[in-house]
Image (tube, rainbow, N blue to C red):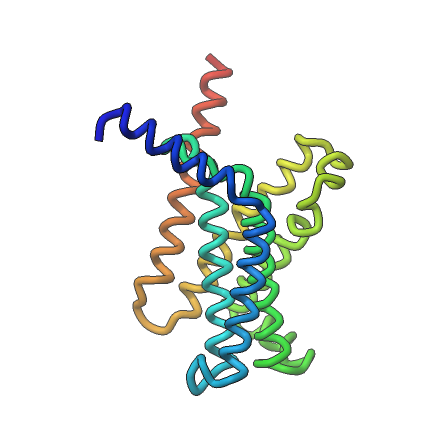
Amino acid sequence: MSSLARTDLMQAVNAGLRRVPPALVYIVGLGWAGWLFFLAATGGLGVEPVEALEHRYGELALQLIVLGLAVTPLRRYLGVNLMPLRRAIGVVAFFFVLAHVLVWAVLDVQTLPAVWADILERPYVTIGMAGFLLLLPLAMTSNDWSVRKLGGAMWRKLHRLVYPAAFLGALHFVWLAKGFQIEPLVYLSAILGLLALRLRRRAHGHAKRAG
């Protein structure tokens, strides 16, 4: 594809993306979560509906976290601009993480002592819970009021917690998977690759300022 055709294609893609209101991301995310819950309640997710629902929510959360981390590289390297949707993607990702945790705690494990025991005794649960706790302040400050209150620099610094949270989420999935499975490794590789791009960019910026 020539550079001119590529530019035209990216302009068309971005023009289409600009027409997508962030509210649509919330509606689709909540609708999809509700549809999965309905399937689980009506036998549409197989013989282990709670386990299936827990895994579906967790996978969707991880997919959206990867997409959220990819927003900046997509714009920088391919010219695809998802920036207007980034906050909505992040909030919906947290919603699926929360739904994943609630299904595990309320429908699967069911009692608070058992939840606590699971966190202490199963390392992959400990790791997953750590990732969830790192995401809590991000979800609570994903609004304009918090950006004004904290200031842009502090807000951006706080939201870098998504990096360790994403890594822990992917590690949780790899550890949880029984045997050698490609899908969890794909998520882990994607997250490590995206984090490496950010570290490389930051190192380049420091070197440029030092020079």
Pick whichever, 21 or 157, lies toward us: 21
Pick whichever, 118 or 143, lies toward us: 143
Residue in view at x 30 percent, y 62 percent:
182
In the image, residue 171 lies at what x, y percent?
Answer: 45, 59
Residue in view at x 61 percent, y 42 percent:
159
The answer to whether 98 appears left or right of 11 in the picture is right
In the image, residue 146 lies at what x, y percent?
Answer: 74, 41
Quadrant of res 197: top left
Relative height, residue 108 to residue 187 (above, below): below
Residue in view at x 34 percent, y 62 percent:
183
Relative height, residue 182 to residue 5 (above, below): below
Quadrant of res 170: bottom left
The answer to whether 167 appears left or right of 140 in the picture is left
Pick whichever, 180 or 76, lies toward us: 76
In the image, residue 64 lies at what x, y percent?
Answer: 48, 53
Relative height, residue 209 to residue 81 (above, below): above
What is the number of callouts on the image?
0
In the image, residue 45 lies at what x, y percent?
Answer: 44, 79
Pick whichever, 150 or 119, lies toward us: 150
Residue in view at x 67 percent, y 82 percent:
111
Q: Residue furthest top?
A: 211
Q: In which quarter of the image is the N terminus?
A: top left
